[in-house]
Image (tube, helix red, strand yellow):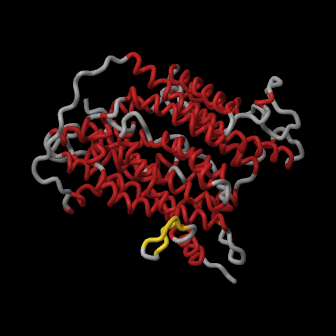
Amino acid sequence: MTLSLYDYVSIGLQAVFTAHPAFHVLGVPISMAVVMLVAGLLTGLIVGAIPALSGPFAMAVALPILISTFGFSAAALLPTLAFLLGVMKAATLGGSVPAILFNTPGTPDAYLTTFDGYPMARNGQAGKALRVAQFACVSGDTMSDMVLITTAPFLAVFVERYMGFPEKGALIILSMAFIGAAVGASAIKGLISAVFGLFLASIGRGDDQTPRLTFGIPDLANGFSVTVAVVGVLILGEVYQAIEDLAHQHRSKTSPSPVVDRGDQKLHWHERLALMPIIGRSGLIGITVGALPGIGSTLAATLGYAIQKRRHKGAVPMGQGAPEGIAATEAASAAVSGANLIPVLSLGIPGNVAAVFILIAIDTIGGLNPGPSVFTLNQHELNPELVMVIGVFVIMMLGNAINWTLGSMLMRRLGVLQHIPPRIMMPLVLVITVAAIYLQEGKMTSIYFALGFGVIGYLMRKMQMSGLPFVIAYILADDLERLLRQGFSASGADPWFLFSSPLAVAFLLASVVVAFTMSRNPIGKTIIKNADPE
């Protein structure tokens, strides 16, 4: 039997809509993947609308629970990814709700949405502002997914055809240098964070017969779990910082006055058409930023708003309730979600914090090995990885379709979540996170390690050092060591094998240039300053 691309798409659609049904409605099977996608979208909307939480937090807590529920079989990967992708997509949309209604961004990306969203709400146009945010967010997300579907296979083919052990190893070094130098206010601190992640990842790991750097402690023989390290630094470190902030804050006796809608709240087609050029431009910005490893949606939103501010010619000035400001911000931040999976599926390199948990799920459960093999169209024998990635694409597009309707119905009702006191939320977040880690790891030592990594994340925040370079370096450390060992062996133990290829040399030179350039000219503060309407 000869398998065509049409056959693979058909099997991928069946894997999403009919395989492993959770229940039946009028005799029609509803698959577990679709159920988990809807559950993830609802969770993302709710979590995004709560200022104390974020999409990556929900993904970090949910991942151990999902793995414990579905197990490690190939059938477990699609429902797990469906939930995580749903959270990733909907959290950005949910974050705009408190930003517009209460001038309190639910996510860091939504900070710039407050510039025009809250003035619109104060002027009696809260409903229209929310509709603008939804329209721009889902449009940008859809654009990004389409670029992912059309771009990732070609990048994977390029990697397979032109890159061997030296090139792949040098590319990982370039990625970590770029992430370390570009993320955060200081390139030097970012690079130190990445190197520290590589160091801790080397404990107890590798192909050596004797575990490394364990100091005779048996619990360190297998190293630290990726989930423990990532959740500790990114989530628990943030919780520790939030609890400290709460301890220094006085309880506010004022609350935002409720907004009242006045006039027409619909977003008419001529208004949507007028916003489309802005959404398209900001979407391209988000896609470009998202495809670069380690740069995140906050920078994309900032760039989108800054460029729109310079080009703005609307009747309402930017920063005083212009719908164009909301559209530019939301489209740019949402467009990151699909593009950040391009390096994940093609190279196994996470694009941002949300993509980190997608990659952890793939590595932990199995059934999908990021790289060229994913997109191999085997005509004589079914390639299950290609079926799986087609299923992922279908889930992402289905999630966008559901966001068009589900987000519209729920966004205004989610405003009540803003009133949950952080003093109640933060301890609850801590308990849920620790319980989720124990559920996956099943031993108390993992809890102690996670709490310790949380302290590391907390100290990094106190030193204004980003935890993302640490996390991505920690995840890529195993791949880097494996490639270096294999390249060293294949070259006949040549210590200079990394410099044997012009492309590898170009990547290594680019690593030095990126680190040097970013350290002399940090871009983050300049962009944010230009974007602020004040």
Figure check: 400 above or below 259: below
Screen quadrant of the C terminus: top left
Q: How many marks?
A: 0
Q: Quadrant of residue 196?
A: top right
Q: Nearer the viewer, residue 287 or 238?
A: 238
Q: Nearer the viewer, residue 488 or 448?
A: 448
Residue at the image position 38 percent from the left and 45 percent from the top? 46
Residue at the image position 36 percent from the left and 56 percent from the top? 138
Q: Is residue 136 visible?
A: yes
Q: Is residue 302 visible?
A: no
Measured as percent of width and height from the top left, residue 338 is found at 48, 54
Q: Quadrant of residue 53?
A: top left
Screen quadrant of the N terminus: bottom right
Q: Quadrant of residue 372?
A: bottom right
Q: Position of 466 compared to 411: left or right?
A: right
Measured as percent of width and height from the top left, residue 34 is found at 48, 63
Measured as percent of width and height from the top left, residue 276 is found at 29, 57
Residue at the image position 68 percent from the left and 62 percent from the top? 373
Figure check: 79 above or below 413: below
Q: Position of 11 compared to 167: left or right?
A: left
